[in-house]
Image: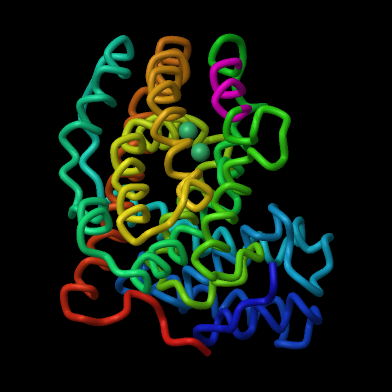
């Protein structure tokens, strides 16, 4: 992805270091900046911390323009990442209430969590009231995840075994278009972005989204990149699928209301159908299967699910709050 603009002292030093290692001081200087940034009062909404995490995680996805691929495993950068991840994981755990459940009841518990989640109603707003500019904003927020759709959860595949692994691969195969590049969900999302006149270049709109939007994708990356958190990534995916089908119908309806055709709504229409199937596989075979196979992971399956609902809820609340005030939900263009 293109190099984003810095949002504070840490991200400024980090970006300079990535382009030219050593140019922003010593490794100790960078670590000191990370420790100072990590002591922020609200890590989920701290622009400097969340952008720094996004940049560090991107080293493990497609990388950053002009940055040496070898830096993915640079020990000094991993130390910076760890320094930020500790308060980040703590903040996400403090944010959520994880229900108690027996390993055999995980799927039903997840379906109940999804059903009881009364989000702030962003999908209803989009269906009924949003104008074109607000739809562009919505897609801009979502682009951070959907242009790499499914990738964070894919990290879990080699960490699972047997029917649980097979269930995850079955869902991911659909996400990646079942062998057809033009059907990859990320490609369908890019198509919707283009239809609305947005730049669909991977990572191009990161500069426009606030920390809380970055935090929701950063949580997926953190769960995905740590084998220790493999159950959280499974729970995250399961509840993500369970809360997808109906909102996607609303998103598509809103675009049709604004006069867009089936090409523009393809991404949303695809998810109405696909995720009604995915939620069953991801809830019962994947998440339920993992909890039966490794009962000690039950709590983390539910934690990942709760984190998904809570963080998506914070993003939606931010967007709606801004719109109700007649303001943009995005950051000002640089
Ligand atoms: Fe998808
Ligand atoms: Fe799906």
Quarter where residue 18 is shown: bottom right
Tell me residue 280's x, y (percent).
Answer: 39, 18
Answer with left or right where residue 75 lies relative to residue 90: right
> In what quadrant of the picture does the N terminus appear?
bottom right
Residue drawn at (46%, 30%), measured in percent from left and top?
A: 234
Segment colored magenta: 166-173
Answer with left or right where residue 267 lies relative to residue 158: left
- Which colouring convention does the figure follow? rainbow
Residue drawn at (56%, 10%), measured in percent from left and top?
A: 163
Tell me residue 5's x, y (percent).
Answer: 59, 83
Tell me residue 120's x, y (percent).
Answer: 18, 54
Residue drawn at (48%, 36%), measured in percent from left and top?
A: 270
Residue 169, magenta (yes or no): yes
Answer with left or right where residue 286 lies relative to residue 194: left
Task: Relative to 85, say whether 274 is above or below.
Answer: above
Tell me residue 13's x, y (percent).
Answer: 64, 84
């Amino acid at each position: 992805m293109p190099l984003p603009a810095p949002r504070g002292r840490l991200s400024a030093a980090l970006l300079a270091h990535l382009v030219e290692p050593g140019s922003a001081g010593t490794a100790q200087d960078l670590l000191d900046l990370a420790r100072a940034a990590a002591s922020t009062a609200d890590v989920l909404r701290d622009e400097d911390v969340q952008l720094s995490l996004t940049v560090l995680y991107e080293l493990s996805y497609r990388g950053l323009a002009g940055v040496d691929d070898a830096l993915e495993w640079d020990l000094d950068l991993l130390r910076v990442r760890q320094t930020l991840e500790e308060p980040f994981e703590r903040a996400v755990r403090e944010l959520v209430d994880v229900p108690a459940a027996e390993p055999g009841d995980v799927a039903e518990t997840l379906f109940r969590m999804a059903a009881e989640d009364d989000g702030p109603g962003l999908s209803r707003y989009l269906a009924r009231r949003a104008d074109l500019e607000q739809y562009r904003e919505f897609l801009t927020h979502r682009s951070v995840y959907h242009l790499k759709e499914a990738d964070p959860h894919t990290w879990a595949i080699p960490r699972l075994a047997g029917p649980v692994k097979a269930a995850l691969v079955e869902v991911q195969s659909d996400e990646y278009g079942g062998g057809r590049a033009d059907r990859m969900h990320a490609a369908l999302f890019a198509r919707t972005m283009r239809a609305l006149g947005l730049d669909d270049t991977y990572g191009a709109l990161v500069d426009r989204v606030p920390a809380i939007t970055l935090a929701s994708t950063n949580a997926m990356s953190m769960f995905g990149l740590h084998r220790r958190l493999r159950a959280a990534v499974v729970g995250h995916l399961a509840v993500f699928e369970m809360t997808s089908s109906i909102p996607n119908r609303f998103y598509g309806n809103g675009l049709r209301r604004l006069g867009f055709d089936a090409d523009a709504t393809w991404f949303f229409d695809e998810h109405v159908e696909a995720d009604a199937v995915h939620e069953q596989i991801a809830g019962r075979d994947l998440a339920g299967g993992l909890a039966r196979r490794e009962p000690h992971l039950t709590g983390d399956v539910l934690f990942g699910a709760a984190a998904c609902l809570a963080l998506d809820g914070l993003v939606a609340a931010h967007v709606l709050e801004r719109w109700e005030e007649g303001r943009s939900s995005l950051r000002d263009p640089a």
